[in-house]
Amino acid sequence: MPKIIRSIIILSIVMVLLSACSYLNLKYQPAPIDRLTKEIDQYFESNEFAHSNWGVLIQSAKTGEIIYSRNSQKLFMPASNEKIPVCSASLINFGPDFKFSSEIYTDGKIENNTLKGNLIIFAGGDPTIGYQEDGKLLFDKWAEELKSKGFTKIEGNIIGNDNIFDDEFLGRGWSWDYLSDWYAAEISPFIFYENTFKVRCSPADEIGKPCNLEIKPNTNFISIINKTKTVEKGQGRRNISFNRAPNTNIIEISGDVDIGSRPFSDYGTIHNPTLYFLTVLKETFEKNGIIITGNVFDNDDIDSNPAKKNLTLLLKQESPELKEILRTLMKKSQNLYSEALVKLLGYYYGKEGSFSEGRKVIQDTLTSCGLDPNNYVMADGSGVCRYDFISPDYIVKIFKYMYHHKYFKEFYDSLPIAGVDGTIKYRMRGTSAEGNIRAKTGTIENVRALSGYATTKDGETIIFSMIVNNYITKVESAEYIQDRVCELLTSFSRNNLSVKY
């Protein structure tokens, strides 16, 4: 055989073999889902978290296909992911349009522009009472409404009836060292300004002088001890700390603030929300020209518990619809809202407005949804407590149930949106996850959780829950992994083999 022919034959065979190899390589390259899970694995196996515990479950909302699982049935401290069962149970039981109401009654009569009798306020658990969009107190509006009924003087007391809740102000297992901070506000059916006060702090004009503190609301209910100090530039920070003496409203505010720095604000808590509400109400009425000869009392302190049928209704204030309240609860991760809703569930659907009765209602609700109540531990309603335990599997089941529920839109709308609002407003910006992740965060010491819905490149809805416990590295490292996995999910396509993850 001529040499040239032999060379052509060999070259042809080589070409065929190369084509076959190329074909086989294309045919047997990993499927998109396999490549996705491998990439996800690399994040959760990071050496930085070698001493930590990750719990993860990622599942298709429509088909139920498990895309990724790691310790998904083990129990983890959820932090504010504890609000997920509270939110879902509240929607299922109350419905999205439900409103809570506060009512003002009197046991007296109006004579010559004077109400001769007491004002009796029945708390309804409305968590939204405070300042309106125009910066005025809602109580200003109440004062005008009462004056329109023909009196500018009250010869009597202002009495608060808070009997729809028990008298447990704090959640189980809450630590003494953060009770002065806004996220540990005391729990009550009387909720004014989220049971906090606001401090606007600005440095003094001279080094060594106390900072200027503006308190809102301006009330005699609290006493401020100003231990702040204006310091040289670079020697201080733009924050302050609160120390409220136990069971008092004497609040010590401290912190070193750089001279010339911009004003900033922070919030502290108060003790006894019922008397706080009533005191500011009385002060506001008096500023609006209503003279009050009496004082403020919790009805339990004066053994006063008249039935509504024996009283005259003067004013009724309804809360926004529940779906609006849940947006604040979930997007802001508002602990007080969640704790109040647990007790409201107990009051409306259990035996009393207590945490234990509200928890039973939530457990019964989840049981009716097909979830085993023995697979999680609910110690408080907000996730502040470190005795709460839940699994990623359980959280995903709640999200899956709500995905098929008639109130799914309201549930979905309550969740923070990556790069847009809520507790993930500044996360995942400029990535495929921005606007495509709706998820609830969870944050306490050594705990980071993120659970919710992802929309893939194909438009598929994916449910996920990622919780890490017992990490000792930087917070940003945990959030970085969660954010990168969210980006993988939102850029994922089942159909495009060329997509890189």
Image: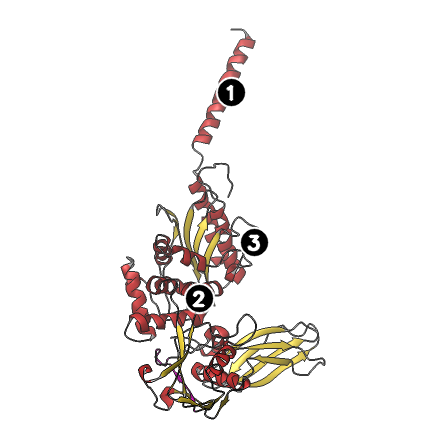
- For the residue carrying disc 3, how many other residues have a C-alpha within 10 Å: few (<14), some (14-19), or many (20+)? some
Horizontal and vertical percent position of residue 90? 36, 65
The region drawn magenta spans: 156-168
> Left of 153 or right of it: where is 265?
right
Sequence-wise, the earlier of marks 1 and 2 is: 1
x and y percent of residue 480 in the render?
Answer: 52, 56
What kind of residue is marked 1?
Met
Q: Which residue is mark 2?
A: 325
Residue at x 46%, y 68% (from the top left corner): 334
Query: Cα distance, mark 1 to mark 2?
Result: 68 Å
Q: Nearer the viewer, mark 2 or mark 3?
A: 2
Q: Is residue 45 visible?
A: no
Residue at position x 32%, y 73% in the image: 347
Q: CA distance from mark 3 to mark 1?
A: 48 Å
| Amino acid tagged 3 | Arg
Residue 1 placement, left or right of 305: right
Is residue 344 located in the magenta-colored stretch of the structure? no
The residue carrying mark 3 is: 429
Q: Secondary structure at mark 2?
A: helix
Q: Residue furthest top?
A: 1
Secondary structure under tag 1 reads helix
| Residue at numbered disc 1 | 15
Q: Earlier in the sequence, mark 3 or mark 1?
A: 1
Closer to the camera, 176 or 435?
435
